[in-house]
Image (cartoon, helix red, strand yellow):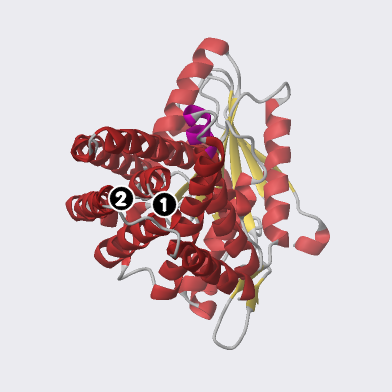
Amino acid sequence: MLPVLTVEITPLVLVLTQITTTPLDSRVLLLTVVLCGVGTVHTEIAVRVESVRRRVTTDTAHVDLCSVWTFAAAIVLPPALAALVAVIVSAHQWWRSYRPRTPLYRQVFTTATIVLAALAASAVMAAVADSSRLAAIVLAVLAYTTVNSCLVAGAIAVSTAKPDLAAAFGDWESNVLEIASLSLGALTALALLINPWLVLFVLPPVLVLHRAVLVRQLAEAARTDLKTGLLNAAAWHSQAERALDRSRHDNAPRGVLVLDLDHFKKVNDTYGHLAGDKVLAAVADALRGEVRDRDLVGRFGGEEFVVLLAELPGGAATELEAVAERMRRRVERLRVEIPTPDGPLTVAGLTVSIGAAVHPGGAQDLRTLLQIADTAVYTAKRDGRNRVRMGRSVGNSGLPRHLVGSEPPAAAR
């Protein structure tokens, strides 16, 4: 907790050292009032949009667009007043949009990181602006986003046993959105320097950007399974159909795997449904770890998962079976740590039955492949679970498909 406390105290100390040298002429005070006012108006107009964004987002690094106003303040105001704008805008946004879900102590830390980011940008402007205002703004953007991102990632690193720093720094789209917000902040600062009331023309683009981001997040949420982060059944089916359509042109074989966790109901009955959700998420991560970026992994509901492997090399059936075996072994080795009031609980001994089918360059549609793989799963279940079964269709001759498979090592039976 000491690093977090240090982050929260540092901006207060820095601001107190700046107060006595802060000019308080009428223009500076007007700019401060305008930025606080337009920042709170933005929050009030976008309060429902931001609340929905907060509910549907799965990103650790959530970009709330208030940096438009706090970065503008860092450019045009003295450091102490820029910090004041950051505190007022951030606190008002928390009160109106985040308060039910974000506790006060977390908001205090978030506000501290924003203030430190604004102070860093303000310091860069003071050091470089005399030589090149454009270079100063570019460097201020880098300083703001670097300080803010690193402090948030650092807090996650010291407070989490197994931190996901990649998620803490955000994906590419989140970082682009932050740069876009800071760019609008720079334009806001230029408008303020020309005429403070020109800032009103910045508000409509910010609100449109806010809604555009919400639409993207809703589209992402509509295709994502919330418990695992995988594609949901509808999204997986749609993307898999397109992948198979492409294979009819390039004649490249694809493979489909259907995976069903063995005795998953026992996990829910023994440890509870929250533990079951943790297990599903861990299995999803294990499956993602065994495929390439262009492969499709989805959750079909319950304890069933599905994978489409694109562009299998020669010996497609052999390669598909090898991937399925790696997945089976990886799930078998999983140990899922679950926090409880009585201490951490470990769920182990998980197994999965896997059925597979190969798409031989256009001979079958997705529905047929899923039926073949699903039948293979039930064969794996009947044969004792925790094993892979390959389902194969013999061309288009009408001959019945046959099921072959690989046995797990004796210790796993």
Q: Quadrant of the N terminus?
A: bottom right
Q: Residue at x 43, y 64 (%)?
A: 19
- Dot 2 corresponds to which residue? 28
Q: Position of residue 320 (x, y in %)?
A: 67, 35
Q: Which is more toward the observer, 394 or 211?
A: 211
- Disc 2 crowd rating (10 Å Cα; few below 14, some 14-19, many 20+) is some
Front residue of 290 and 369:
290
Indicate the quadrant where residue 245 lies. top left
Quarter of the image for residue 164 reads bottom right
Residue 96 place in picture, x, y as percent: 24, 64
Residue denoted by label 1: 78
Asked whether residue 320 is drawn in magenta, I would say: no
Q: Is residue 136 above or below residue 62?
A: above
Question: Predominant secondary structure in magenta?
Answer: helix
Q: Is residue 295 visible?
A: yes
Q: Say which element carries label 2.
A: helix
Q: Is residue 374 visible?
A: no
Residue at (68, 67) in percent of width and height: 335
**Relative to 374, is 392 on the left or the right?**
right
First to last magenta residue range: 133-139
Query: Mark 1–mark 2 contact, CB under 8 Å?
Result: yes
How far from the left and from the top, in percent, is residue 281? 54, 58
Q: Is residue 35 left or right of residue 273?
A: left
Q: Amino acid at mark 2?
A: Val
